[in-house]
Image: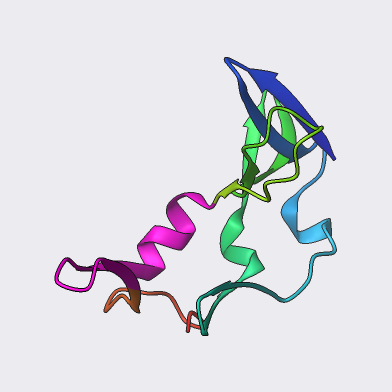
Amino acid sequence: MYCNTWQNNEFCYWYNTECSAVNMPDDFVIQLGEYNYTIPMKYFLADTMNNGRHDCDVFIQELDQDLTVATNTVRLGDPFFSGFMPIFDTANQSLGLAVSERAQTGIT
């Protein structure tokens, strides 16, 4: 797996590999407060072509540029935000998530 830096961002992918050949966990689970949000990992992978070469892109990105600080900050990208809708509770100053009506199969 390669992570290239471009304009202070890391882009991770499997070089010369189709996504069907990548061994990943079945699900990606993120816990916010007391709730677990689950998305099948297959939704974070996409087959791409680069100069005739097959690559498998990953749509999860670590945002920590300073490797000496462990903040566990990630960008989840389109697969996450097409599966969940934000709920803004201004009265209680909180943010929640709900499964989108358009979420793909397996998103809970």
- 96, 18: nearer the viewer: 96
Please tell me whether residue 66 is drawn above or below residue 97 in the rendered image. above
Q: Coloring scheme of the render?
A: rainbow
Q: Is residue 34 magenta?
A: no
Please tell me whether residue 69 is drawn above or below residue 41 in the rendered image. above
Residue 51 in view of the camera: no
Residue 96 in view of the camera: yes
| Location of residue 5 (image quadrant) | top right
Query: Which range of residues does the magenta coloring cover?
Result: 76-96
> What residue sits 73% from the left and 54% below the top?
19
Q: Is residue 80 magenta?
A: yes
- 86, 77: nearer the viewer: 86
Q: Horizontal placement of 15 versus 77: left or right?
A: right
Residue 99 placed where, x, y %?
A: 35, 79
Q: Horizontal placement of 98 versus 66: left or right?
A: left
- 53, 57: nearer the viewer: 57
> What residue sits 85% from the left and 64% below the top?
23
Specify the farthest residue to the front. Answer: 92
Specify the farthest residue to the top. Answer: 7
- 57, 93: nearer the viewer: 93
Please tell me whether residue 82 is drawn above or below residue 31 in the rendered image. above
Q: Horizontal placement of 35 versus 99: left or right?
A: right
